[in-house]
Image: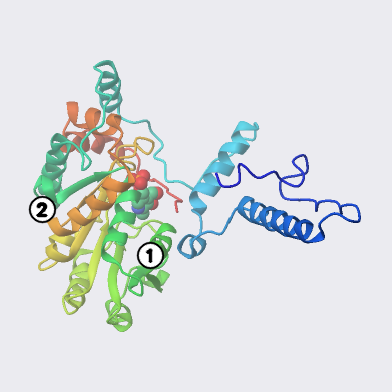
Amino acid sequence: MAFSSLSTPSSSSPSSSFTLPTKPSPGAGSLSFARASAGRFRMAAVRAQAEAVDTSISPRVSALRPSKTMAITDMASALRQAGVPVIGLAAGEPDFDTPAVIAEAGINAIRDGSTRYTPNAGTMELRKAICNKLQEENGLTYSPDQVLVSNGAKQCITQAVLAVCSPGDEVLIPAPFWVSYPEMARLAGATPVILPTSISDNFLLKPESFASVITEKSRLLILCSPSNPTGSVYPRELLEEIAAIVKKYPRLLVLSDEIYEHIIYHPAKHTSFAALPGMYDRTLTVNGFSKAFAMTGWRLGYLAAPKHFVSACGKIQSQVSICLSFLSSESFCATISAIECCNFLIPYFSYHPLFFFADG
Ligand SMILES: Cc1ncc(COP(=O)(O)O)c(C=O)c1O
């Protein structure tokens, strides 16, 4: 606005360059010429500076590495589009379609005009269905206000890490791990601490090595069982040993990523960490529908935890995304409860004794 009444030295020159006025003929007031020149020079310099955009990125984002899973998946799609026959093993995609009953519910939701914003935490119906599932399958008692439904488990985990970790905190991650965990820690300004495991231990965390790395900065242990990428399932007894260690550290919380709960084979049994004695109050359980129900593109995941953690995550979610896609919330619970859906899938999985995921 202040510049609008000023004529630029050369309006036709490129925006970032400028020309000095030509020297007046002898006899003209040299003082006023010098003032005018200096003024124009200054204005042009200010303009050039204003037009040079500051492209710097915040240190928090600069420290973040982009998702390799998504990079490889995008590369595979581009190759496919170019006619190259590739099989993508990056993102964990079940090899069957979303069950027809769910797909139908989605179609009906569109036809019924249920295409509006839904509550930020997920519809009450959907959260009640999730509570039923957690009770029946996992022995966990939650009320709907202890459940937050998000656009995929990934959003749940990111929000949970952001909600409980402060800069300088340590996030303990057994290796091999899903590649996003350390980046989520970095996003929160926390430090990922990688805990090696070995093939001779089935890539399961040894209680003694876990105990040896805990410091006063340790804030969050991320457990993924069944594990991506190893497929290992933590036996209940081992989880109990880990829980006994966790119990000694009041600051230490556990994020239990149970997204692969249903991709499990006899004799392995899934145990929810929150169901172990003393762990309910310090466990944030994450699960979702992507893997078990082949709903990766629908974006439907959830967090169940003590109310104060859920509220904190909900606060983030309310500023990050308005709500779930209507397709996910309306259609999924409109026709079937999560339990019915599980029953529907059991025959499918029993016919697929080998089920590989190379995911990250
Ligand atoms: C271990 C693990 N947790 C969470 C997710 C995220 O799942 P969602 O599709 O629900 O965001 C993935 C996806 O690949 C995963 O492998």
**Residue 234: x %, y % from top left:** 27, 63
Instruction: For label 1, count other residues whose C-alpha is less than 10 Å away and answer few (under 14), some (14-19) or many (20+).
Output: many
**Residue marked by disc 2:** 139
Identity of the residue furthest to the right in this view: 26
Tag 2's secondary structure? Answer: loop
Determine if residue 98 is in view. Answer: yes
Marks counted in the figure total: 2
**Residue 156: x %, y % from top left:** 29, 51
Name the side, left or right, on which 241 lies relative to 14. left
- The residue under the point 52% across, 44% down is 73
Distance from the alpha carbon under mark 2 to that under mark 1: 29 Å
Report whether the residue tagged 2 is closer than 8 Å to ligand 1. no
Between 172 and 27, the residue placed more toward the observer is: 27
Q: Of marks 2 and 1, which one's residue comes earlier in the chain?
A: 2
Corner quadrant of residue 214: bottom left
**Residue 177: x %, y % from top left:** 41, 62
The image shows residue 7, relative to residue 161, as above or below, that is above
User: Which label number is shown at residue 207?
Assistant: none
**Quick one: quadrant of the N terminus?**
top right
**Residue marked by disc 1:** 185
Identity of the residue furthest to the top in this view: 111
Name the side, left or right, on which 183 lies relative to 253. right
The image shows residue 79, relative to residue 177, as above or below, that is above
